[in-house]
Amino acid sequence: MRRTKEEAEQTKQAILEAAINVFFERGVAKASLEEVARAAEVTRGAVYWHFKNKVEIFEALHEKLHTPFIEQILEGLEVDHPNPVEQLQHICTTLILALEEDEQLRKAIQLFMFKCDYSGELAFCKNRFNVKKQEKLKAFEAYFEKAQRQQTLPMSADPRMLALSVNCFIRGVVSEYLDSPRQFTLKQDVPPMMQLFFKSILQPAAS
């Protein structure tokens, strides 16, 4: 029985990996479950065994992308770090650098950022994804609140505004890289960019 469960999970992951490629090439609206099944080298019945429809696959892909990211952010909050803002900088930098080594991750992010207009049957997904975004923003905010408690960030700082700023900055870096990957090298350029951005957050504490 355990082997059967393992094989079922392997099939499910194969379907998701295939869906990234199919959705990326064809667009979510134009892609079909038949195309996903062929790309995954499984039957259409196997696809329906794991997913009711295309929207459910789309949501599962978002969950697969979002969950590891938010888990790393939240796990960092449990660590006793002398400077939570610098800790957040390191975590975010590491997550961005992962793009260079993971083609499927790049495709998945491009899919959600650039290749879906969230209309029609996908319209309600945007609201659900926004809930996930708020979860991420709250996690970012918690780092700044922790820094204030540890007195490494001024109490006058606004954790919510800083969280929004970090999110927008990271999204901008990722967007620019995915749109024009030859314009800069992640390993070379991202660490100093992140250092510059986060230094501007901590600067008031040093003055």
Image: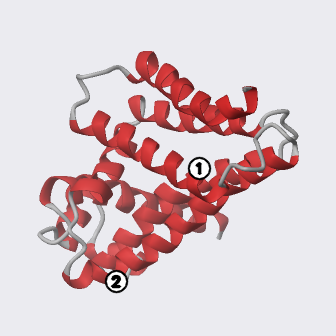
Above or below, 64 against 154 in this view is below
Quarter residue 13 falls in: bottom left
Using the image as rendered, state which of residue 31 and residue 65 is in the foreground.
Answer: 65
Helix, strand or loop for disc 1 = helix
Above or below, 91 against 29 in this view is above
Using the image as rendered, state which of residue 78 and residue 6 is in the foreground.
Answer: 78
* Residue at horizontal 28 percent and vertical 81 percent from the top: 123
Can residue 68 be seen from the camera position used here? no
Using the image as rendered, state which of residue 6 and residue 74 is in the foreground.
Answer: 74
Using the image as rendered, state which of residue 162 and residue 44 is in the foreground.
Answer: 162
Q: Cβ–Cβ below 8 Å for labels 1 and 2?
A: no
Name the residue carrying label 2: 124
Can residue 7 be seen from the camera position used here? yes
* Residue at horizontal 79 percent and vertical 44 percent from the top: 147
Name the residue carrying label 1: 162
Residue 45: image location, x then y, percent: 31, 78
Residue 196: image location, x then y, percent: 52, 25
* Residue at horizontal 83 percent and vertical 36 percent from the top: 81
Residue 36: image location, x then y, percent: 24, 64
Q: Which of the image's four quarters has the C terminus?
A: top right
The mark lying in front, picked from 1 and 2, is: 1
Residue 70: image location, x then y, percent: 61, 55
Q: Which of the image's four quarters has the N terminus?
A: bottom right
Kindly identify the amino acid type of the residue bearing the numbered disc 1: Leu
